[in-house]
Image (spheres, rainbow, N blue to C red):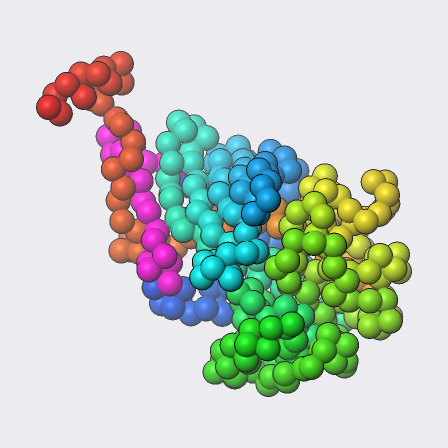
Amino acid sequence: MTPLPSDLAYVPFVSVENMMRLVHETGVETFLRELAQFIEEDFKRWPEFDKTPRIASHSADGVIELMPTADAENYGFKYVNGHPKNMREGYQTVTAFGVLSSVANGYPVLLTEMTVLTALRTAATSAVVATYLAPKNSQVMGMIGNGAQCEFQALAFRTLLGINTVRLYDVDPSATDKAARNLKAQGFEVIKCQSAEDAVEGAQIITTCTADKQYATILTDNMVGSGQHINAIGGDCPGKTELHKDILLRSDIFVEYPEQTRIEGEIQQLAQDYPVTELWRVMRGEAEGRRDQKQTTLFDSVGFAIEDFSALRYVHSKIQGTDFAQPLDMLADPDDPRDLFGMLARAK
């Protein structure tokens, strides 16, 4: 990845409008497939990254987080919030932006919105993981929680696994109506369900994605059958869970970064030394994923910075030589690096 030359201090910025243009011109399913390839590539070189759990600032209203990581060439971070009450007040629950910088000189090479991009990278990650963990020839996904992530998840699972039937349930019927309308327009067979139990009936894959930050039991043990794959993507902070502990105890659990997942994921319910499998090891062939059709697998997803890094890297590659980014004059770059004051004085 080539950093900006020192005589050009403009940083490419991808706005929400341009991100949506980029997705549509690429094609949403092509975008998801290509993004998934970048994510899988970076998981397979996991040891190369500087890794740390995300830095979170919690308040009574929600959480604001920074998610940083770096390899030998580039540094990336995402700023993201999570405020469940926002929906009631007409705001997004989650918003985000991200920066990719050159390690060589510290100059940013990309600033981009990441609210839309995070939904896409979360869905792409879920689907990539499912290619290793879900039962072969899966056809039906039950989706509990039909908010902002729902349609992205469905599209990613169709793109990578061929899922075309979705069973939807949300405690808010209007959310289910919204998701059903959008997914039918995308060609899915949609079944609106009256309960979580109904939603998982006959599904090979179960996706849970609820917003409330509380210890909740979205899935009970009797609702999960032998051989199902659970894509638990709602967990993202201490004190928030979606699955009954008994489900964890009889599932093979796969995680992104244990040091973060033990704080924020479903496994915060378990002992700190409870065995889990890191997904990068599965993707590199160092650990087993799905062994047979009877195995119950659980992706305890909380989202990790390397996935955002992959998304930043992908978008940076897509905007080269296009008009999807606009230059931002955000770096002071005097002709003489020692004369910052002189640059200011001359500007008068």
The relative height of residue 116 versus residue 309 in the rendered view (above or below) is below
Residue 18 belongs to the span the image colors magenta: yes
Judge from the rendering whether residue 272 lies leftward or rightward of residue 136; answer left or right: right
Residue 165 belongs to the span the image colors magenta: no
Residue at 86%, 43% in the rendered image: 271
- Magenta span covers which residues? 2-20
Q: Is residue 330 visible?
A: yes
Residue at 82%, 72% in the rendered image: 223
Judge from the rendering whether residue 77 lies leftward or rightward of residue 173; answer left or right: left
The relative height of residue 344 versus residue 250 in the rendered view (above or below) is above
Rendered location of residue 139, percent (x, y):
69, 79
Residue at 38%, 43% in the rendered image: 110
Rendered location of residue 86, percent (x, y):
50, 56
> Which image quarter: residue 194?
bottom right
Q: Which quadrant of the figure contains the C terminus? A: top left
Rendered location of residue 147, percent (x, y):
56, 67
Residue at 63%, 68% in the rendered image: 145
